[in-house]
């Protein structure tokens, strides 16, 4: 589940999440991007990860710079961690 800053559900499921990344990358020119230090709090088979980010890109002829935080909720499945919630916080 991908959730926007206003708690609107943006994408449900792995295919929709991947498609949202693909749509952005195929239609925008990324000029600069950075990710800050990731903080992870683990609670058994669940974890919450937070990070800061900044991106400058051109989309439909307009250059934009955005900064924010991502909040991820993950669950362990065997040896793997799966994202079950991602929220952008600006």
Image: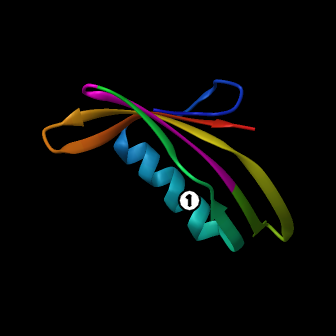
**Which corner quadrant holds the N terminus?**
top left
**Snapshot quadrant of residue 82:** top left
Q: Which residues are magenta?
A: 44-53
- Residue 17 in the image: state x and y as whole percent: 45, 45
- Residue 3 in the image: state x and y as whole percent: 57, 31
The residue that mark 1 highlights is: 23
- Residue 22 in the image: state x and y as whole percent: 50, 61
- Residue 85 in the image: state x and y as whole percent: 45, 31
Q: Is residue 12 visible?
A: no
What's the residue at 66%, 53% (across, down)? Answer: 53
> From what the image shows, is residue 39 above or below residue 59?
above
Position of 58 with respect to 49 (left or right) is right
Depth check: 21 or 74 in front?
A: 74
What's the residue at 43%, 44% (across, down)? Answer: 16
Predominant SS of the magenta segment: strand
> From what the image shows, is residue 60 above or below residue 5?
below
Depth check: 3 or 61 in front?
A: 3
Q: Is residue 78 magenta?
A: no
């Amino acid at each position: 589940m991908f959730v926007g800053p206003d708690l609107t559900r943006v994408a449900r499921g792995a295919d929709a999440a991947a498609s949202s990344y693909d749509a952005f990358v195929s239609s925008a020119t990324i000029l600069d991007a950075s990710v800050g230090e990731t903080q992870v709090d683990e609670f058994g088979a669940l974890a919450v990860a937070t990070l800061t980010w900044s991106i400058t890109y051109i989309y439909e002829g307009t250059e934009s710079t955005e900064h924010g935080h991502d909040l991820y909720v993950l669950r362990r499945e065997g040896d793997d961690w799966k994202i079950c919630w991602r929220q952008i916080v600006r």
